[in-house]
Amino acid sequence: MSNIQKLREVLLNGNPMLFLGAGFSYGSKNSCGDMATGDILKREIYNIFVKNVIEDSDEAEVKQFSLQELCGFVNEHLKKKDELKKYLLKRFQDVIPAQFHYLLSKYPWKKIYTVNIDDLVEHICYKNHIDIVVQNTSKEKIVKDELEYVKLHGCVNAPDEPFIFSKSEYDNLISSRMNFKHNKLISDIQNENFIFIGASLDERDIDYYISQYENAGHFRKGRLFFIEPYPSLKLKMRVERLGGIIIDWTTKQFLEFVEKVNFNPTELERRKMRLNYSGIYLLKDILNSIPKDEVYESRLYEGYNSNWHDLKDGWLFETSNIYEIYEKIDQINFSNNNNFCLALYGKAFSGKDCILKIVGAYLEKKGFEVLEFKGKKLDIRVLREYISNSTNEKYALLVENASYYYKIIEKILQTDTGKHLLIVTTSRNYYHMKKKYYLEGNPYDEYSIDDSIDKICAQNIYAKLKEKGYLGNISVNELTGIQQIIKEKNYINLFTTITYGNGFKKRLKKTSKEILESNPEVKNLYIELTIFDKADLSYYPSELLTARYSMDFDIFNQKNYKNLSKEQALIVDFVKLDEQGIGLKNIILRDKVWESLNQNEKSHAIVHILKEISPYVEENENNYWKIIFESILKEDCLENKFGLNLKKILLIYYQLKEAFSDISYYWLQLGIAEQKCNEYNKALNHLNMAHVIRPKAYQIQHAIGRNYLKYANYLNDSIQADTLFKQGEEIMLELIRSSEYNKEKAKNYSIHCYVLEKIQYIKRHKKSISNKELLQIKQYIDMIKNDKDVYIDSMVIRYMNLLKDLDKLNIISMKPNDIYFQALRKKDKHDYEQDVLVESY
């Protein structure tokens, strides 16, 4: 296939992004004349700002300056930065396109990036009635159906924003960690097809972006095309190294070619393109993209996640509970609600991902159009618009590791497209139980996936392993083999034995020691992968891997493993990778590595991860970067999952203050940690900072009210405690009585907190309390007593013990079967949760 045919194929199937350099504007003009090339611009700047104002002896040297050096000289040495900016505004404003430039709008580009500050593309889009969002400010603008145009070096229509022309301005741009345009391009260039027009790799930031693509190695998903009429040898050598393609066309020739391609998708096809860009793919497209005649050897039994090739080639086995899941699906009644969610949950390595794919195939057979979400942000809008414009009546959306998306899924459940939508999700136990309150009150059901192996499951596994020639250490005798499988008890033990042999668990201590004594890259990578796994994060993203490590993950494609270095072997043996990133494939080794780490090593790695992802974390952007941030930063996770003490947790938070000072969740978690240290004044200050950023967030209001109540119960001074408790009580009762949806939904948490702190307050400060007040507490308990609340029994025990201590049991009526009567028979063990904190918003 020729390079031009490859370009045509990408235009027809790949929906590429554009990157426009200065050469793209060639042929356009404005009141100052033709758009200036770099050399002409440099000459003009020299004549206007430098000529006749420097020593004659310096002229020859200054004339040899690059454009970046010359602009820096004018800004910093001649102190004419404002004057230079005024000149640049005039020089690049109100550009009149050449006729061929208007052909740019003949193709539905996924996105356009540029280093140009002129308004050429804006004029093209205006003339051709193309809706466009120009990202030309430091704050990101919301994009819906419009073309997104990202201006990396500034814009003549945003004169208050910085322009990037001098060397120091380039340096600041590249080193800036909080530039959303910069961060998006680094991610996009690793994941999308790009066409560069008139872009010189001599520009420092373009070279930096290309280097990020180069470093991505195995994880590069797209191709790079360079449209350059007179490519230099340097450019040819660089593009060859990248595996890119140069086509020696002018901009005019390229745009005329695009017009002839005549790519004119229907409205539904456009919706599908947006759907794919957001990380949602049609199952039929996924299955059709799998090579038909390619010999495929699954790595599922080595601890890898399942993929659709595994399903298509028959590597997945049916578990004994799959028919119960089918039955639940068949019983769903869409007559009352067009949307429904089935939430599957279980431990790590319980086969959830395999079951989800089997369920997806089942739904396809049942007439559903099945979609799978594999992106970093679940976009309700593009999903709704695709379903609304498609002709099918039944849809299924599959979402792995979905607990952090439950709030978004709740919104989807409340959005009616007029079609039937079944959302099937998988999550690990911990976060499912923490976050399922978003699903409660909506049309949903849940199903716990057990990882134990019963006889039926063992028979299915044995048959599949034998069929695929993967019995390993399992006996070829069927009865003996099935018994061996049952004896392993769960999938983790079974596949560890199959892959590594019976003696592997005994060798783990030695292996974990080898990892921690390996070179710093291998050691640090394993520590960070362990943190991700402990935090129940589904994968370590490829963008983070590229930024932090120089490892070549093409080693996974090598056939001759005998030639791997010792460090490479440690990676290949115990790390799994897919298109999104990498993860540990052995939970037993994870635990061994974790046990070997001290608190300093853990906290050091946590801080490094969070600082590295800080540019990608935004207050109102609910994506995978935010999930990583919240999962690792959460005080409960740091204390209970990572085993860090409160002193170490506070030190972590203080080290991250600069990186996350504009994120409310950071201040919320810092406040919670300070509450636990009885630092209630500090906590209130930081919780109020969270409240300023996110004034309507229930969780923050709850935490502030809770802080007052706990502070009152910490003090010995009853007078001061009275004032504090009344403030907290007012906040908490407002939350309990509120009819706002998010507060009404979460009232259990406020009731738990208020009732338990009220009981503590009465006892600690020996408060006299009327029967009316005691009955009011019962009314709050009654509001939630019929809910599925695992903590309600302990709260009722505390309440009944209070009545007993006050000799007031007679004020309530009880029946033998109600929770109040039963609580009298139970002892107060003092080991239950005082109150439960609601999860992230």
Image (cartoon, helix red, strand yellow):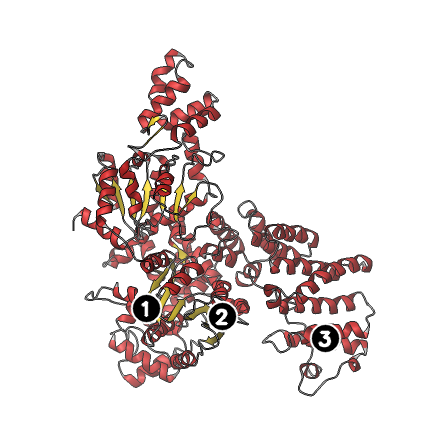
Q: Where residue 243 appears, x then y in whole percent?
A: 24, 46
Tell me which amino acid carries mark 1: Leu
Which residue is more in the foreground, 136 or 265? 265
Q: Is residue 279 visible?
A: yes
Judge whether 238 appears above or below 531 on screen.
Answer: above
Q: CA distance from mark 1 to mark 2?
A: 22 Å
In this figure, which residue is indicated by the disc labeled 2?
A: 429
Q: Residue furthest top?
A: 56
Q: Is residue 528 left or right of residue 6?
A: right
The residue positioned 31% from the left and 32% from the top of the image is: 28
Q: Is residue 335 left or right of residue 578?
A: right
Q: Secondary structure at mark 2?
A: helix
Q: Where residue 523 appears, x then y in whole percent?
A: 41, 53
Tell me which amino acid carries mark 3: Lys
Tell me which amino acid carries mark 2: Asn
Which residue is more in the foreground, 362 or 457? 362
Q: Where residue 285 appears, x then y in whole percent?
A: 29, 64
Disc number lying in front (1 or 2): 2
Q: CA distance from mark 3 to mark 2?
A: 32 Å
Few, some or many residues within 10 Å of mark 2 (<14, 14–19, 20+): some
Q: Secondary structure at mark 3?
A: helix
Q: Which image quadrant for residue 296?
A: bottom left
Disc number lying in front (3 or 2): 3
Quadrant of image for the C terminus: bottom right
Q: CA distance from mark 3 to mark 1?
A: 53 Å
In this figure, which residue is indicated by the disc labeled 1?
A: 300
Marks 3/1 in contact by CB < 8 Å: the verdict is no
N-terminal-most mark, 1 or 2: 1
Q: Is residue 17 left or right of residue 231?
A: right
Q: Where residue 607 appears, x then y in whole percent?
A: 51, 50
In this figure, which residue is indicated by the disc labeled 3?
A: 778
